[in-house]
Amino acid sequence: MTSSHQNKPPAFAPIAKLSRALQTGQMSSVALTQECLRRIAAHDVDFRSFLAVYEEEALAAAEQADQELRAGRDRGSLHGIPVALKDLVNMQGKPTTAGSPLLSTNIAQQDAGIVQRIVDAGGVIVGKTHLVQFALGAWGTNAHMDTPRNPASRGTDTLVAGGSSSGSAVAVAAHLVPWAIGSDTGGSVRVPAAFCGIVGFKPTIDALPRTGVYPLSESLDSLGLLASSVQDARLCFEALVGAPIATPETRRRIGVLEADELAPLAPPIARCHAQSLKRLEQAGFSLVPMRFPAPLAAFKEVTNAIMIAEGAWVNHRFLDDPGLPMDPSVRPRLIAARATTAVQYLEARATAASWQRAFAAEMDRLGLSAVAMPVTAMTAPRIEDVDHNLAPVHFTRPINLLALCGIALPAGQDGDQRPIGLQLVARAGDDHALLNVASEVAAALHPDPDRALSQEPCRA
């Protein structure tokens, strides 16, 4: 393991502080963007988060941001702030590979909706990040386009970053950019956030526009945000969708899983999860036992009947030629999905709709603002130890099937200093309220915010 993994660049200031410095002229967007480009050039040879860096375009956008700010035109809190895009997102004139060499000549004819929103907000796009091929995988590996390295790696252990938004998570966790765009179909923002020790926010489906984004599953995909803190995630989300008209009231009743649903947790995760819940109780939250509409294990078959079938439809043109460069963990799943019948697919859709109604009714019955649950059952393994027959999405995939919003927060570390996450989930459309709850939960987990980046609150 190279020394840069153990000596990451220092963390950026919070985005709100960077924004104030830009607005008051204490800092220029050009200087901030140059610092991001310098960090990428110096450190990403080891972290491998970026697929492409757009230095010329980024500096031009930063110069425009500075000119506008000097002229008194303030586009908001993201004006002049650098960002990275997961390479599912179209950027006019640039390739969108979706993590596959098969799409290396797929040049975008126009910007994706999310890119237009970033540009309208004055954001500075510095490049595209690596991902799992076609976004179909939760470990973050890619046999053909490169596998990002988790900045939490220590010594000779090179840990997976989690996927499929591996590069976006690593770019933020390694402090190469202040924030990044990812996507989440079954956990692909929240899993890498948990593995890398940062915040990953999966809003309600279509809260962020998906136009111009290469799909995996039209029914389950959401665009999401990777950031260093809940405050940064909330600032970015509000800049892209608008702030709430009124501050949502935080109800301090949080659902928690029954003990049998926590059985898959590795012992360090189980201990840290229990400590996290204790901290929430100490902070005045009421913890209410609750159950999902079906055992969490039952969500796998129903989700796959929708997600993989839709993914096979999107990518069917690549499946008949075994000589094409496709990851061995991706191709068999797409081919197998061709056997899904129309009846199975429609039954899965009907089951999902039924479970969505049941979950909403249970949240209402118990008066819950959110549910607190693990993100993954284990911490990030070494790249060479990954078992592609398994996936770390047991606790995340139900959230997509139920059409909820969810956020992963840093909660602790295991004995090898591998990050552990805590997940909060809420009803569809309750994105702003969930971010409010997450802010209070993060404060309970990290009583000393000045030390939150350097010392995790629980050791498991």
Image (tube, grey):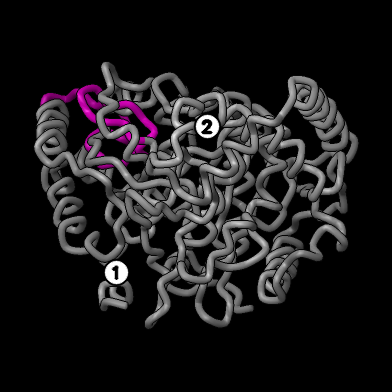
Specify the amino acid type for callout 2. Answer: Leu
Taking 121 as reference, is 196 above or below it? below
Please tell me which residue lies in front, 340 or 367: 340
Q: Quadrant of the N terminus?
A: bottom left
Q: Which of the marked residues, 1 or 2, is nearer the chain's N terminus?
A: 1
The image quarter in which residue 352 lies:
top right
Q: Which residue is mark 1?
A: 8
Q: Secondary structure at mark 2?
A: loop
Specify the amino acid type for callout 1. Answer: Lys
Give the magenta part as a residue range.
71-97
Q: Which residue is mark 2?
A: 216
Please tell me which residue lies in front, 413 or 76: 413
Q: Is residue 430 visible?
A: no
Q: CA distance from mark 1 to mark 2?
A: 33 Å
405 vs 84, left or right, is right
Q: Residue at x 82, y 37 (%)?
A: 363
Q: Quadrant of the C terminus?
A: bottom right
Tell me where residue 246 appears, x and y as whole percent: 58, 26
Q: Residue furthest right?
A: 365
